Amino acid sequence: MPLTPVLRRALTLAAVLVAAAPVGAQSRTAGYHSAARLAAVVDSIGRANPQLVRVTTLATSPGGRPVQVLRIGGADEKPGLLVLAGAFGPQLASSEVALRLVREVTARVQRDAATRALLTDYTLYVVPRLNPDAAEAYFATLRHERRGNDERSDDDRDHVVDEDAADDLNGDGMITMMRVRTGPGGGGEWMPDPVDPALLRRADPLKGEQGLYKLYIEGRDDDGDGLYNEDGPGGTDPSINFANNYQFFVAGAGEHQFSAAETRAVAEFVTARTNLAAVYVLGMQDNLIKPWEGRRTPGIGGSPQGTSAGGPFTAILPEDATWYAEIAKKAPRPVAAIDPVSAAENGDPLSWAYYHMGRFAFGSRVWWPGRPPADTAAGRRAPTPDPIATERNDYRWLKAHDPSGFVEWKEVAGLTIDGKPVEVGGFAPFARLNPAAATLDSLGLQQAGWVLELTRMLPRTQLAGPVTVTSVGPRVWRLTADVVNTNYLPTNAAIGARSRLPRRVMVELALPTGITLSSGRKQQFIESLRGSGGTQRFEWVVVGDAGATLTLRVGAPNTGAVTETITLRAR
């Protein structure tokens, strides 16, 4: 099936933008989409594919920007996979990759019969950008990594809102960091790294180290309260506003779980769609590079976790761990010197999808700085273990591939804190989270293939063969049915079977007038049927005339359903 003219023009424009994007600070926004551009492209994909794609608005951010969701393929009645991106605002790469995977998937449906068949039986939902307000800071004249949405918030609880924002002290158009040299005994906690002096690390008193610097976000004490940049623009951070292990009174966490319109809309969306079998989060938590491990951990007062007395689970169930380990082996893995550090699971969407909504939930960082050139200079070898391994890797990679990604420390003339001179420098905003735009197309292509593979793994319940009918006496019949899960993943994760989310597979025998049930139950449930051919047998004894018919229905919203008409006739 050929590409439509509208979609062809959209893809061509994107390719031109990406190909034309040079590397460097002046071109970082090229190839990336502002909220308005993103919404326009998403809408154009929907218009170009009206039979395949449906675009709706989940929520409107406090800044008036839409949070959109694309439904691709099937329908809400088909088993589904949700791809959720862009919850952490500064990481625009996740939402850009989500947009590109949508383009690739829709294009494959047009040209590939197997993909077309897959998305007839399954439904793919994609939220490209959950936190559009914070992402918009990427396109501002003054570049600053903001995490919160545009909700006004009194972060320092002084009854004045947004009165102490960061300031561009050195006039480079970016908010980085500032360090103040205190000297030994001056209360500083930071010291230059002996291997890469441009980097700072915390002094370790156990090793006899003394801090030489205090470290702040670049800016002034605008409200004169002795603190720096503690109450700038930005309210709730959706990436920490979900319910699992939610942290009250943490900056950006919001007034309570789901207090942000963006996160509340996602919760309502998932709750309403019992067909969702799994969730894939493109964000700061990653359990595909290092899969979650299952363990039994004593809860409060020694009571079992997952009970009212023992408190919530703090680790996945061991029964689910083997599936996570195997899925991780199949997932794409970028080449890098070190694995990414997965962000803490505090109020994040990934752990919420597993612990609270009972779904298999997978997370990917999508991109992080890769392997820097080998440094063979004498005296340059990093210690083992390295307390700043991630920062060192990122610093060296940026120095080699994008020098504008790190601002060398430089004193700001005439500016002091506590009588000490101030230097400004450090990692440039967004540089460690987002690659040059030319990289995004290949990442989107890779992730599109993985999302389709993950969709093929979603559970599928079927009858292993025709229902067997055996005559056991005059007008008495034994019915035997084998229910099988033909796909890879179990019909429910162990956490889902425990919480009854999503729904269990139902096996229901519908008896018309004239047929009675002598043995067995009309309606039965399967707690969880393992993947790759897991089978469970069901038997009934019914009484009825030869030639009479009845119906067997098997399935669940997240596994698909089948119906078979049974004729009471010995086979």
Image (cartoon, rainbow, N blue to C red):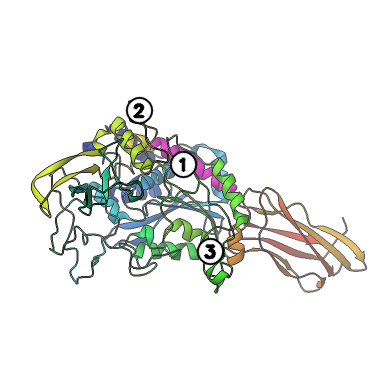
For this view, does 428 lie left or right of residue 8? left
Q: Say whether residue 100 is visible.
A: yes
Label 1 sits on what residue type?
Gln
Identify whether 412 is placed above or below 225.
Answer: above
Q: Kindly identify which residue carries mark 2.
A: 375
Q: Cβ–Cβ below 8 Å for labels 1 and 2?
A: no
Q: Kindly identify which residue carries mark 3.
A: 313
Magenta segment range? 441-460
Q: How crowded is mark 3: few (under 14 residues within 10 Å), some or many (20 or more)?
A: many
Q: Position of residue 370 (x, y in %)?
A: 39, 35
Q: Residues within 10 Å of mark 1 (few under 14, many from 20)?
A: many
Q: Say whether residue 546 is visible.
A: no
Q: Cβ–Cβ below 8 Å for labels 3 and 1?
A: no
Q: What element carries label 1?
A: helix
The secondary structure making up most of the magenta span is helix
Q: Which of marks 2 and 3 is nearer the N terminus?
A: 3
Label 3 sits on what residue type?
Phe
State the image quarter where residue 493 is shown.
bottom right
Mark 1 or 2, closer to the camera: 2
Q: Which of marks 1 and 2 is nearer the N terminus?
A: 2
Q: Position of residue 549 (x, y in %)?
A: 79, 64
Q: Nearer the viewer, residue 366 or 136?
A: 366
- 453 drawn magenta: yes
Q: Residues within 10 Å of mark 2 (few under 14, many from 20)?
A: few
- Residue 447 got which mark? 1
For this view, does 67 lie left or right of residue 318? left
Q: How many numbered tags mark residues here?
A: 3
Mark 3 or 1, closer to the camera: 3
Q: Position of residue 289 (x, y in %)?
A: 49, 43
